[in-house]
């Protein structure tokens, strides 16, 4: 596959992730942060592990599209959780640490992927990439829900006296 093709396939993941960010936020606000994040992390771990086994460009594009969807749904609730638990006056520091952590992952991810691909092959590197996602899932399962209360649906809100 050409360099352009590789970029296009991975661009599919970003496009589908972008497409679900708003719905993911709405669901996290109406159903709860964990209710959105837990299934998304499971789907993300499975999809990234399976992506190493695809054998055609089209199958990889589909895998990346699905990966983008799960990534979008897994990526929004942590920011909402952060805003739920951050004391007033500390939001700038909290967001700075949160962004630093995410950006560090983006910087180290390709390096780690190269190392694991050299050591364990292409398929092995995708399977290994699922491990931190599963670790995050275990942490989320042990974390209490941070949303104070589910928000009202638009029809319920219209009926509210407030």
Image (cartoon, rainbow, N blue to C red):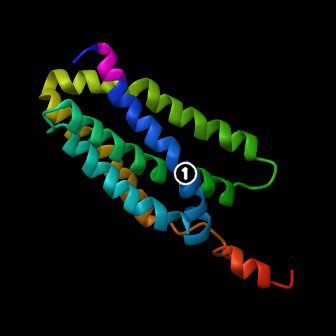
Callout 1: few (<14), some (14-19), or many (20+) C-alpha neighbours within 10 Å?
many
The outermost residue toward the right is 162
Q: Which contiguous range is marked in magenta?
A: 3-7
Quadrant holding the C terminus: bottom right
Is residue 139 in the magenta section?
Answer: no
Residue furthest front in the image: 58
Quadrant of residue 9 within the rendered picture: top left
State which quadrant residue 92 falls in.
top right
Write the residue at 81% across / 49% down.
89
Q: Residue at x 75, y 78 (%)?
A: 157
Which residue is located at x 52 percent, y 41 percent?
Answer: 18
- Majority secondary structure of magenta residues: helix
Q: Residue at x 40, y 57 (%)?
A: 40
Seen in the picture, residue 57 relative to 79 is either above or below; the reply is above
Judge whether 49 appears above or below 8 on screen: below
Which percent across, then down, holds residue 154? 70, 74
The N terminus is located in which quarter?
top left
Instruction: Describe residue 156's horizontal placement relative to residue 81 as left or right.
Output: right
List the residue tagged with mark 1. 76
């Amino acid at each position: 596959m050409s360099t352009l093709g590789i970029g296009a396939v991975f661009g599919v993941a970003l496009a589908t992730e972008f497409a679900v960010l708003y719905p993911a936020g709405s669901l996290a606000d109406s159903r709860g942060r964990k209710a959105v994040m837990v299934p998304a992390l499971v789907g993300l771990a499975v999809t990234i592990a399976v992506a190493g086994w695809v054998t055609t460009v089209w199958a990889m594009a589909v895998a990346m599209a699905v990966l983008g969807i799960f990534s979008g749904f897994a990526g929004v609730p942590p920011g909402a959780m952060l805003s739920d638990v951050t004391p007033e006056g500390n939001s700038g520091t909290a967001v700075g640490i949160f962004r630093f952590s995410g950006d560090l992952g983006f910087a180290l991810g390709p390096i780690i992927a190269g190392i694991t691909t050299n050591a364990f092959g292409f398929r092995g590197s995708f399977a290994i990439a699922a491990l931190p996602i599963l670790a995050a899932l275990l942490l989320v399962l042990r974390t209490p829900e941070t949303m104070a209360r589910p928000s009202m649906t638009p029809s319920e809100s219209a009926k509210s006296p407030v």
